[in-house]
Image (cartoon, rainbow, N blue to C red):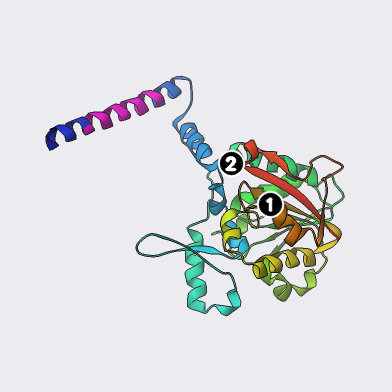
Amino acid sequence: MVSIGARKKNSSLGFCTKRVVVIVSALALLALGLQASSLIRSLEHDLLQHSFEKPMNATLSGAAVLTETNQIGTNDRIIGGDSDAMSEVEKEKLKQKMEAWVYEPKNINYFWKKMGDRPFQREFYSRLGKGNFNRLLDVGARSYNKLCKDLINSTSVEYFQMEPNLPPDPSDLKNDGLLECYMNEVREKYPDQVSNFDLIIDFGVFGWKLVQNEFNDAKVKGYVDSVKWLLRDKGCWVLKTDQGWVPNEVEFFDKHILPYFTMKDFDNHAYESGHSIKGGNFNFFFFYKK
């Protein structure tokens, strides 16, 4: 029988060995000329490659849902986003909890060049200023999104954003107009925006699994109806989805989206609907209003 003291000693030795391996690995990287900050950023990159990037992108903000926590741990129940039905205390509580999901990278350029699907998004936004689009709406707005308008790089394209929970410094946002609301309440709060956009960019909101897990048919319909209401005739809804976001993607599209939209390629076949990156972790679909 091994004594408790021997177990502790073996455990300590194992722990020390692991620390030595980590230290040696870090020194080896430094010897190759990498700075410590680069090492940290690379670790962030590995973590954010996966779908866990979404909650930190204020995904829940755009969809008007939020994971609630209790004193014991994480409660998987999601709070629905009917803001008008909430009291002021509930709204403030929702806002405070929402802040825990917000991710604001310190190195924005690195974030857009390396993180997850951001390199593809960088390429995508850069095409928009050269296309046949006059007015765009981006669902969700954080400080790092200020690069989007610069990537579009056009004086003839108006770039709007939708965000109900603004970043700490709203002056960080860079747009031509802001809809400060949830998607499902846009018709009530901004009735003048009907049929006002050629393109709606929906990256990491409607197509995120935790959102769809808690969206019933009524909420899904309300969201899709709002997108359709905002778009001009033949306008395009660019929807990014994560792997496994719904149990059966084909059935979901057939039931909720394709009755109102046609799925096509984008920008003269530059991208096919279902364009996939990162081994299928991220997929992009292009739906055109019927």
Say which element carries label 2: helix
Instruction: Kindly indicate the quadrant of the structure image that contains residue 137.
Output: bottom right
State the image coordinates of residue 288 (x, y, percent, origin top left).
83, 55
Q: Which of the two labelled residues, at mark 2 and mark 1, occupies the earlier sequence position?
A: 2
Q: Which amino acid type is shown beneath numbered disc 2?
A: Phe
* Residue wearing tag 2: 111
Please report the residue visible at 55 percent of the width from the left and 42 percent of the height from the top: 50
Q: Please report contact status of discs 2 and 1: CB closer than 8 Å, yes or no.
A: no
Point out the image quarter for the C terminus: bottom right
Q: Is residue 248 above or below residue 272?
A: below
Location of the N terminus (image quadrant): top left
The answer to whether residue 181 is seen in the rendering is no
Residue at 73% in and 56% down: 253
Residue indicated by mark 1: 249
Horizontally, is 130 left or right of 210 in the view? right
**Residue 4 falls in image quadrant:** top left
Q: For residue 18: magenta?
A: yes
Whether residue 168 appears in magenta in the rendering, the answer is no
Left or right of residue 71, residue 123 in this image: right
Query: Which callout, 2 or 1, points to the residue nearer the camera?
Result: 1
Residue at left 54%, top 77%? 86
Going by the image, does 111 lie left or right of 255? left
Indicate whether 142 appears above or below 219: above
Residue 170 horizontal side relative to residue 72, left or right: right
Q: Which residues are magenta?
A: 11-25
Q: Main secondary structure of the magenta part?
A: helix
Of residues 168 and 88, the one drawn nearer to the viewer in this rendering = 88
